[in-house]
């Protein structure tokens, strides 16, 4: 809100010319000064709150190595996103696996934070069991079982009836990139300059999701947007016990063999994807890595900043484009 003061003749001078007493003028001037002080206080408080919401809970790497990540509260009053980066979370038989996860909570942060602490551990246990029984990993079974156990864990508590979280996770090895998605967070890959979607959002109006919900006895209602039972704007999540069986925790899994043309991968919550397309996100990261500049900063300053953390650049761009949600981004360099 603009709190500027008009430059027209003061009300006190007008009142004096009209015959108002000196006492009345003094009272009016005092009231006016008091109101101006209030406006100044409100203005400063609003700016402070805006900055707090934008930059609170910002995370980033403090070196030039990848992955880099950024997680900001944005214009929301509460931070419900969480990110997880676990390098070499499994290291067996000379093969190393890295884990990345973005969790977008709703109704509160508890489920998202629980996923951040536990999901990669559950997956590591499942991978260990699988590795003892077979040489080849059945990634779909591994991911589905891990998400199911995570869902069971959070639903054991009484407070998660209306709390849940989406989850998009990636496991990267020297041979493959495995992505599991449950909800409307998203993963994309840049391969040889081409954007490759690694997941498809679970929205209630997606034809197959709508059919599944209706066959299980649920409905999709337009209540400030299409929602399951008029409540939830995503059709899959971990938690949300009161919306089962219509909202499920089963992820969709994609497996891509590593390619020499692989450049980087982006995982992000819908706070980014609501305002930035897959192609634009990849273009921005590619320009950051190439050291292209924009804005008022010098080339040296901007190059250092964006190369250190293109994920931060994406969150700032999403804010500038009007994102009203928490924004969490992980950028994984696949050239290393």
Image (cartoon, rainbow, N blue to C red):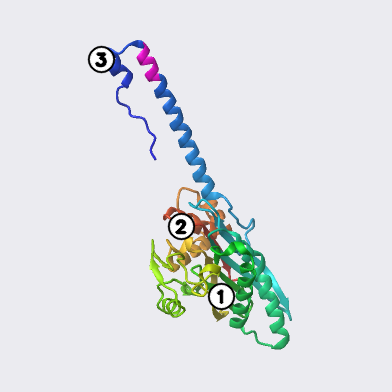
Q: Nearer the viewer, mark 2 or mark 1?
A: 1
Q: CA distance from mark 1 to mark 3?
A: 76 Å
* Disc 2, SS: helix
The answer to whether any part of residue 25 appears in the image is yes
Q: Nearer the viewer, mark 2 or mark 3?
A: 3
* Disc 1, SS: strand
Find disc 1 in the rendering and name its residue: 180
Q: Earlier in the sequence, mark 2 or mark 3?
A: 3
Q: Quadrant of residue 13?
A: top left
Whether residue 228 sits left or right of residue 151 in the image: it is left
Outermost residue toward the left?
18
Q: Is residue 307 part of the magenta span, yes or no? A: no
Q: Residues within 10 Å of mark 1 (few under 14, many from 20)?
A: many
Q: Closest to the observer: 290 or 216?
A: 216
Find disc 2 in the rendering and name its residue: 318
Q: Earlier in the sequence, mark 1 or mark 3?
A: 3
Q: Quadrant of residue 203?
A: bottom left
* Disc 3, SS: loop
Q: Residue 245, percent across and down?
A: 51, 75
Q: Residues within 10 Å of mark 3 (few under 14, many from 20)?
A: few
Q: Residue 249, percent across and down?
A: 55, 74
Q: Which residues are magenta?
A: 23-29
- Residue 89 is labelled as none
- The reply to whether discs 1 and 3 touch (Cβ–Cβ < 8 Å) is no
Q: Quadrant of the C terminus?
A: bottom right
- The reply to whether discs 2 and 1 touch (Cβ–Cβ < 8 Å) is no
What secondary structure is the stretch in magenta mostly built from? helix
Q: Is residue 38 above or below residue 17?
A: below
Q: Earlier in the sequence, mark 2 or mark 1?
A: 1
The answer to whether any part of residue 192 appears in the image is no
Q: Closest to the observer: 225 or 331?
A: 225
Find disc 3 in the rendering and name its residue: 18
């Amino acid at each position: 809100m603009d709190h500027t003061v008009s430059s027209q003749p003061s009300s006190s001078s007008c009142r004096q010319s009209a015959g108002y007493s000196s006492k009345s003028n003094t009272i009016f001037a005092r009231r006016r000064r008091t109101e101006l002080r209030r406006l100044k206080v409100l203005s400063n408080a609003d700016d402070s709150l805006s900055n707090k919401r934008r930059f609170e809970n910002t995370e980033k790497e403090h070196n030039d190595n990848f992955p880099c990540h950024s997680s900001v509260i944005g214009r929301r009053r509460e931070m419900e996103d969480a990110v997880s980066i676990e390098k070499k979370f499994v290291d067996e038989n000379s093969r190393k696996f890295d884990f990345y996860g973005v969790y977008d909570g709703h109704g509160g942060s508890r489920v998202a934070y629980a996923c951040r602490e536990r999901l990669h551990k559950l997956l590591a246990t499942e991978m260990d069991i699988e590795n003892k029984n077979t040489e080849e990993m059945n990634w779909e079974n591994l991911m589905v079982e891990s998400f199911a156990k995570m869902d069971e864990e959070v639903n054991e508590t009484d407070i998660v009836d209306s709390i849940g979280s989406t989850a998009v996770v990636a496991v990267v090895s020297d041979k493959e990139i495995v992505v599991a998605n449950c909800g409307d967070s998203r993963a994309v890959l840049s391969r040889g300059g081409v954007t490759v979607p690694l997941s498809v959002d679970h929205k209630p109006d997606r034809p197959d999701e709508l059919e599944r919900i209706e066959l299980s006895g649920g409905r999709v209602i337009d209540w400030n947007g299409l929602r399951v039972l008029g409540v939830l704007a995503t059709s899959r999540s971990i938690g949300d016990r009161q919306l089962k069986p219509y909202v499920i925790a089963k992820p969709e899994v994609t497996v891509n063999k590593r390619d020499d043309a692989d450049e980087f991968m982006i995982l992000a919550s819908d706070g980014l994807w609501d305002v930035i397309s897959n192609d634009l996100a990849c273009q921005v990261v590619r320009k950051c890595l190439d050291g292209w500049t924009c804005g008022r900063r010098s080339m040296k300053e901007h190059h250092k900043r964006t190369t250190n953390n293109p994920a931060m650049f994406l969150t700032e761009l999403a804010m500038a484009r009007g994102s009203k949600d928490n924004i969490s981004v992980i950028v994984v360099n696949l050239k290393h």
